[in-house]
Image (spheres, rainbow, N blue to C red):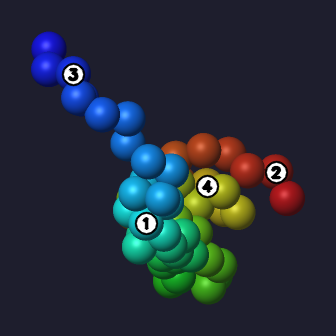
Amino acid sequence: MAQPKRKQSKQRSRKRRGSQPFQAPQLAKDPTDGTLFMPHRVNPMNGMYRGRQVIDVEV
């Protein structure tokens, strides 16, 4: 594999990382009870996924 000829400076690395700040996660709203959860995942509050009950959640 190819190897870099020179060490990459700290300033160069930090410039690259500094241009991509952290972002808050996108959240979806559950139509049944209005809780927020990450999309494409099971809602941890009520155990629903795409309108179906997939896990039992004790309240």
Kindly give the residue lying farthest to the right in the view shown.
59
Give left or right: position of 26 versus 34.
Answer: left
Label 4 – label 3 distance at C-alpha: 49 Å
Q: Residues within 10 Å of mark 4 (few under 14, many from 20)?
A: some
User: Disc 1 marks which amino acid?
Assistant: Lys
User: Which of labels 1 and 4 is toward the front?
Assistant: 1
Name which of mark 3 and mark 1 comes first in the sequence. Answer: 3
Q: How far apart in space, not on screen, are marks 3 and 2 (Cα)?
A: 55 Å
- Dot 3 lies on which element? loop
Q: Residues within 10 Å of mark 3 (few under 14, many from 20)?
A: few
**Quick one: label 2 or label 4, which is nearer the N terminus?**
4
Q: Is residue 48 visible?
A: no
Q: Could you tell me the amino acid type at mark 2? A: Glu
Please identify the quadrant where the C terminus is shown.
bottom right
Q: Horizontal and vertical percent for residue 39?
A: 44, 66
Q: Nearer the viewer, mark 2 or mark 1?
A: 1
Per the model, the C-alpha gap separating discs 3 and 1 is 22 Å
Q: For the residues marked 2 and 1, what is the alpha-carbon distance in whole angstroms?
A: 47 Å
Q: CA distance from mark 1 to mark 4?
A: 42 Å
Residue 55, position as x, y percentages in the image? 60, 44
Q: Which residue is mark 4?
A: 47
Q: Which residue is mark 3?
A: 3
Q: Is residue 16 above or below residue 8?
A: below
Left or right for 38, reference 1: right
Residue 15's mark?
1
Please indicate, yes or no, whether residue 34 appears anywhere in the rendered image.
Answer: yes
> What residue is shown with label 2?
58
Element class at badge 1:
helix
Tag in front: 3 or 2: 3
Q: Position of residue 28 (x, y in %)?
A: 49, 77
